[in-house]
Image: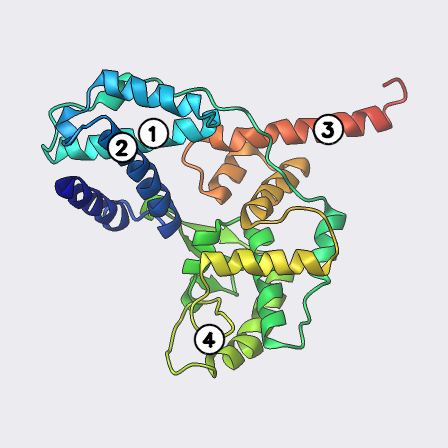
Amino acid sequence: MENVNKSLQLFKEYLQIEKNYSEYTVVHYEQSIEHFFIFMKQQQLLHFSDVTYTDVRLYLTELYKKQYARRTVAKKISTLRSFFQYLLKEKIVAENPFTLVSLPKREQKLPHFLYEEELEKLFEVSDVTTDLGQRDQALLELLYATGIRVSECCKLSLQDIDFSLGTIFVHGKGNKQRYVPFGSYAGHALNIYISNGRKQLLEKTSIHTNQLFLNYRGGPLTTRGVRLILNNLIKKTSSTIHISPHVLRHTFATHLLNEGADMRSVQELLGHENLSSTQIYTHVTKDHLRNIYMSSHPRA
């Protein structure tokens, strides 16, 4: 299986360099492909060219037997389809057997979002007299103000912030770039953090970095670090709600649509390639409108 592992390494480099995928996405791809490698060994398939449509169907059956969720199955098959497409392009295989398999329909799960009173509790938690408190407040305000992905947030540098226009320059998925505005609350929190807290954090290391958000040692903050910060903020509120960078992204989109923003504008702000990715939020806003109607209309 030595050539198999070599091909995976080359594919990972292709995703990182040519596709500019985030570290999180590349790891997900790697795990799905390695899972298929185990299946190949079990079926004594030594080369990628040995894999046929029949083998793919058998693999699909195995996934369903192990009761994987449809969403997980769809992700695995989609990943392997991309991988074999790469192998086809590199002439390692003569055909892509995964193109013949239709992806299972995903369960339509409504995005989880926070209500304004839940957000207010979060915004009151950080001790903004400390360097880490100022960082956490700026991070929280910016994630909610812009709806950017956690990977995009961790790529932000000082040069990406334009205080005069109130915008950030976002390096998005697939090397796509966009400008996203932020409001006065985020601007105020960022100003305090950059002027004070960030400088104090930089003093803890000899390494210079222009990255906006830093960890407690003064180094660049990672996506995992952002998730830990949000979890700690929630613990301080003694709330049972679940929080993640993506929940803040969902909240950003839902609140905009609830207040009358048009779908195309929200799509552009989120950096969604397809409008269908944004349309899931209409289900949430429809529920919101229905609740308002039922509680407000005299003959509801």
Q: Nearer the viewer, residue 56 or 18?
A: 56
Q: Is residue 181 visible?
A: yes
Name the residue beneath numbered marker 2: 82
Name the residue beneath numbered marker 3: 289
Indicate left or right for 248 with 104 as reference. right
Contact, CB < 8 Å: mark 4 with mark 3?
Answer: no
- Where is residue 29? Give x, y as percent: 33, 40
Quarter of the image with the C terminus is: top right
Residue at (61, 56) in percent of width and height: 231
Contact, CB < 8 Å: mark 2 with mark 4?
Answer: no
Q: CA distance from mark 1 to mark 3?
A: 35 Å
Residue at (60, 52) in percent of width and height: 144
Earlier in the chain: of badge 2 and badge 3, it is 2
Nearer to us: label 2 or label 3: 2
Earlier in the chain: of badge 4 and badge 3, it is 4
Q: Nearer the viewer, residue 275 or 132?
A: 132
Q: Amino acid at mark 4?
A: Gly
Where residue 41 sits, quadrant-wise, is: top left
Name the residue beneath numbered marker 1: 78
Does dot 1 land on a helix, a strand or a loop? helix
Q: Which mark is residue 25?
A: none
- Where is residue 22? Give x, y as percent: 36, 50
Contact, CB < 8 Å: mark 1 with mark 4?
Answer: no
Q: Amino acid at mark 1?
A: Ser
- Where is residue 245? Give x, y as percent: 55, 50
Q: Which mark is residue 218?
A: 4
Earlier in the chain: of badge 2 and badge 4, it is 2
Q: Amino acid at mark 2?
A: Ser
